[in-house]
């Protein structure tokens, strides 16, 4: 790196910038295009979801609650919810249990097992 040789006192900054560039190169496809989402009228903030998750988790991890979650249980619940939101859960159930008939209710997101 020519920058490193010329300005050695800036090497830590250059290293961080290079690491950030590498991160963006590897994960750029996962970074949302907020301008496109805004133009399409889609939500660009997840703050309300994060607030709800923090609220639920703080209540469920308190030992004084009659019902509480373990870290493993919370992780599994979040994995399941992610699959529901990504519409992957039905496909997983069809793969795991081919005999199970899963149908969508007229309201949209709720599932019925027959």
Image (spheres, helix red, strand yellow):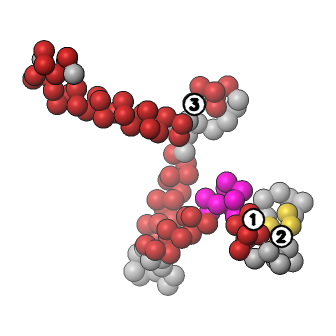
Image-based side of 80 in relation to 26, left or right: right
Can the viewer see residue 69? yes
Of 16 and 109, which appears nearest the observer?
A: 16
Q: Which residues are magenta?
A: 81-89
Quickly name the residue at label 2: 102
Residue visible at 62% across and 63% down in the picture = 81
In this view, which residue lies farthest toward the right? 106
Label 1 and label 3: CA atoms lie apart by: 28 Å
Label 1 close to label 2 by CB (< 8 Å): yes
Q: What is the number of the mark on residue 33?
A: 3
Whether the magenta-drawn stretch holds residue 25 is answered as no
Residue 60 percent coordinates (x, y) = 48, 73
Image-based side of 108 in relation to 23, left or right: right
Residue 114 percent coordinates (x, y) = 87, 77
- Of the 4 image quadrants, the one containing the N terminus is top left
Residue 67 percent coordinates (x, y) = 51, 82
* Secondary structure found at label 1: helix
Which image quadrant for residue 80?
A: bottom right
Label 3 close to label 2 by CB (< 8 Å): no
Label 3 and label 2: CA atoms lie apart by: 34 Å
Number of disc labels: 3
Whether the magenta-drawn stretch holds residue 84 is answered as yes
Q: What is the number of the mark on residue 90?
A: 1
Image-based side of 57 in relation to 21, left or right: right
Residue visible at 67% across and 54% down in the picture = 86
Residue visible at 90% across and 60% down in the picture = 106
Q: Earlier in the sequence, mark 3 or mark 2?
A: 3
| Main SS of residues in magenta | helix
Residue 74 percent coordinates (x, y) = 50, 70
């Amino acid at each position: 790196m020519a920058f490193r040789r010329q300005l050695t006192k800036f090497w830590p900054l250059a290293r961080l910038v290079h690491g950030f560039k590498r991160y963006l190169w590897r994960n750029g496809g996962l970074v949302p295009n907020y301008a496109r989402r805004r133009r399409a009228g889609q939500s660009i903030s997840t703050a309300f979801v994060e607030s709800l998750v923090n609220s639920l988790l703080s209540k469920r991890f308190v030992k004084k609650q009659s019902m509480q979650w373990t870290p493993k249980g919370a992780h599994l619940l979040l994995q399941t919810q992610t699959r529901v939101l990504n519409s992957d859960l039905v496909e997983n159930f069809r793969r795991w249990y081919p005999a199970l008939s899963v149908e969508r209710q007229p309201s949209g997101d709720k599932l019925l097992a027959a």
